[in-house]
Each structure stands twice: as C-alpha cells, then as structure tokens.
Image: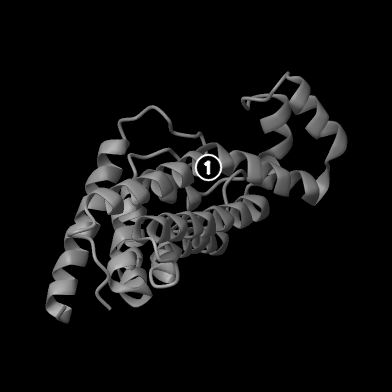
Amino acid sequence: MKNTKKLAYCAMLIALSTALAIVSLIIPLQLPFGGSVTLASMLPIVIASYMFGIKWGVGSAFVFSIIQMLLGGHTVASFFMPGDSQMFWIKAIVVCLIDYIIAYTVIGFAGIFAEKIKSPALSAAVGGAFATFLRYVCHIISGAIFFGTWAEGFFSEWGPFAETSFGSWVIQNFNGSGLAWFYSVVYNGLYMIPEIIITTVGAFIVVKVLKKYIVISR
C-alpha cells in the first residue's frame, strides 16, 4: 500500500480514536486526579500499528497524544497553577511528557507481534495488551514520583479503600516511597486494567470479524 493511502487510513483511525475519547468524556468513570475508562479509544491506534507497522503506529499514537493533551486541558492547566499545593512548572512539563506524550505514544508499539504470531486476531490482541500495558507503566512512574504524596489519604481518608481492611493493611505495611509506588499501581490500575481488557478484547474481535479488511501492509 502506498504511503498516501497509509496516511489517509491513519488519519481516519486517529479521528475515530478522538471521537471515542470525546464520547467517553460523558461516562461518569473519571478519577479525581486524572484517568478514566473509555469506549476503546486506543483501539483504532492499535489497529493502525497492527496494519502498517510500528513506524506508522508510533506516528499515529504521537498525534493522538497531542489531541489527548488538548482534551485534558483542564487537568493539564491545573499542573501549572500557582500555589503551595501545585507543582512547579518544570515538574508540570515532565508530568505532561510522561502522562500524555510518552504514555499515549507507546500505544504505537501494538504492531510488534503482527508478523510473529500466526493468528491475526491473537497477534492484534497480544499487541494491544502489550502496548496498553506500556501506557500503564508510564502512568505508574508518573504517579509514584509526582502524586505519591496523596497515597496515605487515598487509602485512609478519601479513596475507595478508605476505612476498609485493605486500606488499613496497606497503611500498616507500606510507607515512604513503597507506599507511593503501591498507591500508583492501585490508583492507575482502577482505570488502566479495564482499558487494557477492553482494548485487548476489542482488537481480537475487530480483527477476527473484519479480517478481510484489516490486513498487514508493511
């Protein structure tokens, strides 16, 4: 397939991902400090990488990462607000880099297994799981480094595990950086684990059903 056609396909898939992300904003599954479950908004990017390879996948994912930053304008802007409880602008830039640019761009690696696993649907699913897991790792790193100060309150005061046996167990067994990392794994897992499952299952079904149209073209 010629590059112009690949570009057109990728543009359409980016637009589809954006549309799914926008529609997902109305779903009441928004976490207080960012992150939400979407209607498989990463799936079209996964398909782009599966069909056209990592180069095109990463390029599409990078464009999508910029769009995600724009859609998350309210959250991004809060990073730069002055005040004792806010981040310095340099830290805010790093957070944006990790949580948006890198976290969404790595989705472009979903096509890494396209020619290594015989089953098209399975290779797309494994690639989708791998790429979305990479995004999860990015959020874990950012959360532990920059948002770890909220870890204790998350498990003891305002989080879903506050005043529960699990929350008490965490507070008793973790502290310092260990608590921050555990908090980040749990907090980001609340939306990323469902996202990983949705994207993986979605990739398998889409490629299985539309195997005549979704073919590898490197």
Between 146 and 208, the one nearer to me in the picture = 208
Between 205 and 46, the one nearer to me in the picture = 205
Residue at 79% over, 33% down: 170
Between 122 and 51, the one nearer to me in the picture = 122
Amino acid type for the residue under numbered disc 1: Ile
Q: Is residue 190 above or below residue 213?
A: above
Residue at 33% over, 67% down: 49
Q: How is the image coloured?
A: one colour
191 with respect to 41 (left or right): right
Looking at the rendered structure, the secondary structure element under dot 1 is helix
Between 100 and 169, the one nearer to me in the picture = 169
89 with respect to 3 (left or right): right
Give the number of marks: 1
15 with respect to 191 (left or right): left
Query: x, y (%) of residue 210?
Result: 21, 52
| Quarter where residue 186 is shown | top right
Q: Which quadrant does the C terminus fall into?
A: bottom left
Task: Please give the residue where the numbered disc 1 appears in the rendered image.
Answer: 193
| Quarter where residue 183 is shown | top right
Query: x, y (%) of residue 101?
Result: 43, 63
